[in-house]
Structure formats: structure tokens, C-alpha cells
Image (cartoon, grey):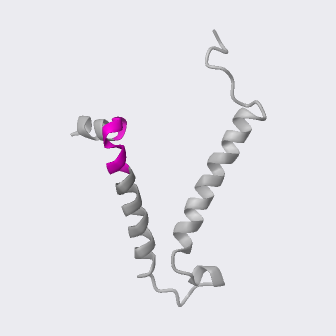
């Protein structure tokens, strides 16, 4: 079973299926957010449907871009053979 999972995520033949699966999961997450009761929300943006999904996606993307900037531009990342 694990061999099939690794093959699914590692093989380029399944790229279209992976992308469709990714978009399907994103749509399901946003759709599930419409089912949440929001009468006890403290802030205005907490009452918006889909806000949690958008906030999570945006914060993950920001984390990736900041870490890549720190690694490549600031110089925290070293070459592969740095210690050789």
C-alpha cells in the first residue's frame, strides 16, 4: 500500500490527478466552513465563510516565502558540499 502512495505522489504520470485531488480538497475545506456556526465569533472576519481556509493558505505561503528569502538571500542556507 505504501508503495502505491509513494508512486502516486512521486510519478509525473499522476500530476493531473494530484492537481485535481488538491483542488477538490480545497473546495471541500471551503464548503465545510459554511457549515460552522458563527454566533460566538469575536471579530468581523471570523464571521466570513471561507476565512479560515484563506487565512491558513496565506499564512503557509507567507511562511514558505519568508523562509526561502532567509535561506537564499540572507545566506542562512549553505551549499550541499559545505562541510566536505
Which quadrant would residue 76 be assigned to in this image?
top right
Residue placed furthest toward the top? 84
Residue placed furthest toward the bottom? 39
Task: Tell me if 77 is positioned left or right of 54 in this view.
Answer: right
Residue 74 lies within the magenta run? no
Residue 14 lies within the magenta run? yes
Task: Tell me if 49 is positioned left or right of 17 in this view.
Answer: right
Magenta stretch, main secondary structure class: helix
Q: Is residue 29 above or below residue 64?
A: below
Residue placed furthest toward the right? 74
Task: Tell me if 16 is positioned left or right of 39 in this view.
Answer: left
**Residue 22, how many percent across, how many down?**
40, 56
Q: Residue at x 44, y 81 (%)?
A: 34
Q: Is residue 33 above or below residue 61?
A: below
Look at the image and tell me in which quarter the N terminus lies. top left
Q: Is residue 75 above or below residue 30?
A: above
Q: Residue at x 61, y 60 (%)?
A: 58
Q: Which residues are magenta?
A: 9-18
Q: Residue at x 61, y 19 (%)?
A: 80
**Residue 27, how many percent across, how many down?**
41, 68
Q: Residue at x 25, y 34 (%)?
A: 3
**Residue 45, how many percent across, how many down?**
63, 80
Task: Tell me if 51 is positioned left or right of 67 in this view.
Answer: left
Look at the image and tell me in which quarter the C terminus lies. top right
Of residues 38 and 19, the one nearer the viewer is: 19
Amino acid at each position: 500500500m505504501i508503495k502505491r502512495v509513494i508512486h502516486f505522489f512521486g510519478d509525473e504520470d499522476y500530476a493531473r490527478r494530484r492537481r485535481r485531488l488538491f483542488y477538490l480538497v480545497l473546495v471541500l475545506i471551503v464548503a465545510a466552513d459554511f457549515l460552522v456556526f458563527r454566533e460566538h465569533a469575536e471579530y468581523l472576519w471570523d464571521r466570513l465563510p471561507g476565512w479560515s481556509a484563506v487565512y491558513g493558505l496565506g499564512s503557509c505561503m507567507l511562511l514558505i516565502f519568508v523562509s526561502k528569502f532567509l535561506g537564499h538571500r540572507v545566506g542562512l542556507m549553505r551549499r550541499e558540499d559545505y562541510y566536505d
